[in-house]
Image: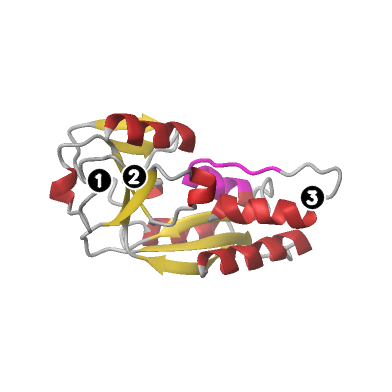
């Protein structure tokens, strides 16, 4: 939904000439970029596990977190995965398959992991840097990643599907902004598009 909303913003406001930047990066870098004003807005998630550390880091950097949606964790898998026929999945169902996760760079604390439940052991682990590689590996290796379950088939294609994960956890997805700077009109419009996209 983040990319989908950004695409919609560009369609509305791009005009004949423009230069916009969108960075998909590690959680810690998202926080740092917004704090240092390299980015106007950042999107991340908070859950029970990372709540204390993320909120302290946001406070220390004079940033606010505004929730957009609270969801139960899901698993992204390939449409042809052996798990695709199941209505929902357990952690035990996932054990035989490779888990894909994003590289966390030099600030690799598991509290800043892109994936929920990153501390759960996995015998097969594949670390990637970008979404395209992750999706290709999901399909090619019958792998999985744990996520929000929000996916846009129009942008990501029909080969990735989401299944509910049977765990007692949540992901609260929201945006971060600097406390002391008024958001630009484009940022406010992007927030409005995000809210609409995620709730439709």
Question: Which of the numbered marks, if any, corresponds to residue 61?
Answer: none
> What residue is at 39 percent from the left and 57 percent from the top?
148
Question: Which of the numbered marks, if any, corresponds to residue 14?
Answer: 3
**Dot 3: element:** loop
| Residue linked to disc 1 | 119
Query: Where residue 38 sits: x, y (%)?
Result: 68, 45
Cα distance between the residues tagged 1 and 2 = 7 Å
Between 200 and 34, the one lying in front of the other is 200
Left or right position of 83 against 26: left
Left or right position of 110 against 55: left
Of marks 1 and 3, the one in the foreground: 3
**Dot 1: element:** loop
- Magenta segment, which residues? 21-33
Characterize the local packing of mark 3: few (<14), some (14-19) or many (20 or more) Cα atoms within 10 angstroms.
few
Q: Residue lying farthest left?
A: 92
Q: Earlier in the sequence, mark 1 or mark 2?
A: 2
Characterize the local packing of mark 2: few (<14), some (14-19) or many (20 or more) Cα atoms within 10 angstroms.
some
Left or right position of 69 against 9: left
- Image quadrant where residue 104 sits: top left
Mark 1 touches mark 2? (CB < 8 Å): yes
| Residue 71 seen | yes
* Residue 9 vertical position relative to residue 95 in the rendered view, above or below: below
Cα distance between the residues tagged 1 and 3 = 41 Å
- Image quadrant where residue 17 sits: top right
Between 75 and 47, the one lying in front of the other is 75
Question: Which of the numbered marks, if any, corresponds to residue 110?
Answer: 2
Q: Earlier in the sequence, mark 3 or mark 2?
A: 3
Of marks 3 and 2, the one in the foreground: 3
Cα distance between the residues tagged 3 and 2 = 37 Å
Query: Where residue 182 sits: x, y (%)?
Result: 74, 66
């Amino acid at each position: 939904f983040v990319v989908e909303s950004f695409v919609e913003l560009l369609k509305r406001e791009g005009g004949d000439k423009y230069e916009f930047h969108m960075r998909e990066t590690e959680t810690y870098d998202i926080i740092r970029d917004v704090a240092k004003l390299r980015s106007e807005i950042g999107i991340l998630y908070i859950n029970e596990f990372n709540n204390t550390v993320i909120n302290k880091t946001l406070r220390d950097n004079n940033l606010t977190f505004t929730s957009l949606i609270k969801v139960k964790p899901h698993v992204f898998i390939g449409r042809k995965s052996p798990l695709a026929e199941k209505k929902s999945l357990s952690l035990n169902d996932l054990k035989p398959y490779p888990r894909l996760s994003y590289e966390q760079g030099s600030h690799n604390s598991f509290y800043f992991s892109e994936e929920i439940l990153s501390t759960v052991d996995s015998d097969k682990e594949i670390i990637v840097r970008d979404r395209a590689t992750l999706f290709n590996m999901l399909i090619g290796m019958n792998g999985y990643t744990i996520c929000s379950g929000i996916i846009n088939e129009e942008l990501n294609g029909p080969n990735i599907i989401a299944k509910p994960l049977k765990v007692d956890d949540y992901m609260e997805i929201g945006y971060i902004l600097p406390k002391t700077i008024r958001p630009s009109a484009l940022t406010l419009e992007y927030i409005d598009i995000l809210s609409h996209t995620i709730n439709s």
